[in-house]
Amino acid sequence: MNRWKSFKIKESKGFTTADVVVSVSTIVIFIGLITSLFYNFYLTATAKNRNAIATNCLIDVIEEVKLMKYEEIENNKIDLLIETLEANQTIPKGYQVNATIQPYNEIQGNENKSDLIKILKVTVNYTVQDKNEKIEISTVITK
């Protein structure tokens, strides 16, 4: 038993400089990783949200045009419709919506066809993270 008493165990009181440096470095690395993960999540969520709003703008324009009478569907009336949707804030600021209508019988090679179909092409331009994005949908409107 006396043999164990001859070993002197150093008492640990406080932290050494190496302990503090290692722990602070570890914390800084983890905080950096977590911050970058949250930032990337925020950017992705923002881009998806802006895309969803642009898609809703497209759908709103298409639905409103489909409610119009076939004979009334013209480019100038669609432009007025888009201005009205922008004024009502159905189309939010930051989204540029353009729509064109083209009768099927005015397309080259179809001149001898009856006026039964019009092609509606709606485009929404918007920016995400300083990049211009564009969504475009074409649909057919029948008489």
Image (tube, rainbow, N blue to C red):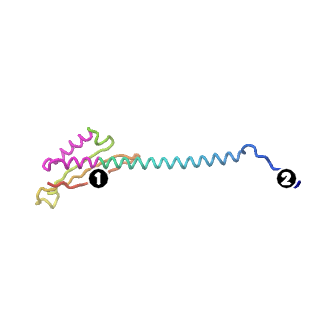
Which numbered disc, 2 or 1, marks the residue that appears first in the sequence?
Answer: 2
* Bounds of the magenta segment: 57-86
Quarter that holds the C terminus = bottom left
Quarter of the figure with residue 86: top left
89, 110: nearer the viewer: 89
The circle drawn on residue 136 is 1
- Left or right, 7 with respect to 85, comes to right
Few, some or many residues within 10 Å of mark 2 (<14, 14–19, 20+): few
Q: Secondary structure at mark 2?
A: loop
Furthest toward the front, the residue is 1
Report the residue marked by disc 2: 7
Q: Residue at x 21, y 52 (%)?
A: 120
The residue located at (18%, 44%) in the rendering is 77
Q: Position of residue 45 (x, y in %)?
A: 42, 48
Amino acid type assigned to the residue bearing label 2 in the image: Phe
Please tell me whether residue 69 belongs to the stretch shown in magenta: yes
